[in-house]
Amino acid sequence: MGQKDPRQIQAELAMPFAPEDLEWRLQKVVEAKELGIAVPYVTNRAIMGRLDDVVGPENWYNEFKPWHGAGGKEAQLCGLSIRYGDGFITKWDGAENSDIEPVKGGLSDSMKRAAVQWGIGRVLYNMDVVFVNVEKQGKTWYIKKDQQEKLDYQYLKMLGKLGLTPAPAGGLRTQAEPEGGEDRQSPEGAVQDKPAGQPEKDNITYLIRNLRVNKGIQSVNTQLVLESSKKERIDAFVRGEHSELAVGVTLTDVELELKQSDTIVYYMLEKYKVADARRKAA
């Protein structure tokens, strides 16, 4: 950390992030008006970059612990430790497991909250309510893609009122993107490395080897383990609960879309046809 004193470290950690280093999520939806309230979060990539820049990668670490509330949803705790002098100081916070990739989502969100304990991204608590246009896909509501410019403007307007200037972008939405741009619902940037078991683009069939329905407070999704006719297995999600999907069912005309949300990469099953009636998996 060189000659930095605690006050300097605190000030540098708390510097506002560039709009490109934020992700926005829906907090509430007014279905009748197709409007939602969007709230910003700093991405984990930006948090890690900030810690590396301010204190050095050798002077911080995180650790996670599972936590089970009394009758509540499973959650993850994150302890974020930073070296001060000859020792480390740790601050803890936690988050419930998410509806998609539950444990990974809990780990990611708990780290965001632990970072706030150190002042990282705490300025976001000054944001006024931001209404955005939303659309429904399956049983889940999403922020419309054309709302990103509005969200960036509202964030910069808030910083201006406080007399603050954002730090340079960490290269998330500024990274190279495919022509036409990346889906703004996941503003963390272009996907570079696809998960293992990347599906082929040919019109091949997929057998459902495993299935689990995840029911959250605001959304429902179905988690699938698919095996292609080439014996390749992939994990995928489909929005909502579908009675025609079951272990042993074969799917054709499958369209799988790769999604990236902060540190999580996964496939969404966008389209499919059921090829045959339910049968037991071999």
Image: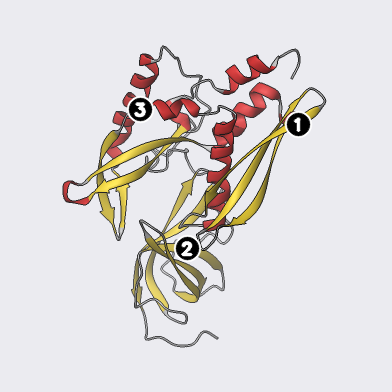
Identify the residue shown where x is 51% and y is 57%. 101
Q: Which mark is residue 88?
A: 1
Residue under label 3, please give it: 152
Q: Give the x, y percent position of residue 5.
A: 70, 14
Label 1 Cα crowd, 10 Å radius (few <14 / some 14-19 / many 20+): few
**Secondary structure found at label 2:** strand
Q: Is residue 221 above or below residue 5?
A: below
Q: Give the x, y percent position of residue 120.
A: 55, 28
Front tag of 2 and 3: 3
**Secondary structure found at label 3:** helix
Q: Nearer the viewer, residue 254 or 48?
A: 48
Residue under label 2, please give it: 236
Instruction: Indicate which disc, 2 or 1, sits on the residue closer to the N terminus.
Output: 1
Rendered image quadrant of residue 163: top left
Q: Is residue 168 above or below residue 93?
A: above
Q: Nearer the viewer, residue 260 or 153?
A: 153
Question: Can residue 180 be seen?
Answer: no
Identify the residue shown where x is 58% and y is 49%. 107
Front tag of 2 and 1: 1
Identify the residue shown where x is 53% and y is 65%. 234
Q: CA distance from mark 2 to mark 1?
A: 40 Å
- Extreme residue in the right direction: 86
Tell me the amino acid under the disc marked 2: Ala
Question: Position of 200 compared to 37: left or right?
Answer: right
Tell me the amino acid under the disc marked 1: Phe
Identify the residue shown where x is 43% and y is 28%. 124
